[in-house]
Amino acid sequence: MKSLLLLRHGKSSWSDDSLADHDRPLKKRGRRAAQHMGRLLAALQLVPDLVLTSTAIRARDTAVLMADTAGYRGTISAIAELYHADPAAFVEVVSQISTEPEVILVVGHNPGMEEWLRQLVESQHEMPTAAVAQIELPVESWGEVTQETRGTLRGLWVPKEVADEESSR
């Protein structure tokens, strides 16, 4: 069994009209949310063994902030095919992982991320910015992941709920 973590990038800024979509940075709220989710993954002992992210600035920054906060010390691989990927592109990238990490985290964008989650667990779930979903996959190797692979949703966390829990402690 492998564990797949899907993380939608944090809230991004639209304040600079001259920037291409790919180059939009995170808002302050998006940065905080990425750090909240990193703390959550550390608390749940779900620090990934491998992090893959879209090349978009907001996705890469989300991945770095989450990883730093969670205690992840590995490489973060930015992959162009993950920028506005559809489920088939996500599957293609994940199935090409040649190492055998137990837990991987993929940082991407909607609507493709929600579509892939729906495909994987056969039910609809919203993934607002910086939300994290954990899916357990019945595979021994990432190379076994196909469009037909189905998994079990083990958790879906939204930054606002995580932040509320942190502030109540």
Image: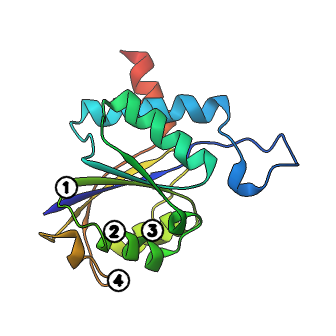
Question: In this figure, which residue is indicated by the disc labeled 1?
Answer: 101
Closer to the N terminus: mark 1 or mark 3?
A: 1
Q: Residues within 10 Å of mark 4 (few under 14, many from 20)?
A: some
What amino acid is labelled 4 in the image?
Answer: Gln
Which x, y percent locates residue 156?
37, 50
Question: In this figure, which residue is indicated by the disc labeled 4?
Answer: 147
What amino acid is labelled 1 in the image?
Answer: Pro
Circle 2 sits in a helix, a strand or a loop, which is it? Answer: helix
Closer to the N terminus: mark 2 or mark 1?
A: 2
Question: In this figure, which residue is indicated by the disc labeled 2?
Answer: 94
Q: Residues within 10 Å of mark 3 (few under 14, many from 20)?
A: few
Front tag of 4 and 3: 4
Q: Determine whether label 4 and label 2 are within 8 Å by CB.
A: no
Which x, y percent locates residue 7?
44, 51
| Residue at 54%, 70% in the rendered image | 85
Circle 4 sits in a helix, a strand or a loop, which is it? Answer: loop
Closer to the N terminus: mark 4 or mark 3?
A: 3
Q: CA distance from mark 1 to mark 3?
A: 27 Å
Q: CA distance from mark 4 to mark 3?
A: 17 Å
Question: In this figure, which residue is indicated by the disc labeled 3?
Answer: 124
Q: Residue furthest right?
A: 17
| Residue at 23%, 67% in the rendered image | 98
Q: Nearer the viewer, residue 69 or 162?
A: 69
User: On the picture, is 18 further left or further right than 77?
Assistant: right
Q: CA distance from mark 4 to mark 2?
A: 11 Å
| Residue at 35%, 15% in the rendered image | 169
What amino acid is labelled 3 in the image?
Answer: Gln
Q: Determine whether label 4 and label 3 are within 8 Å by CB.
A: no
Residue 43 at least partly seen: yes
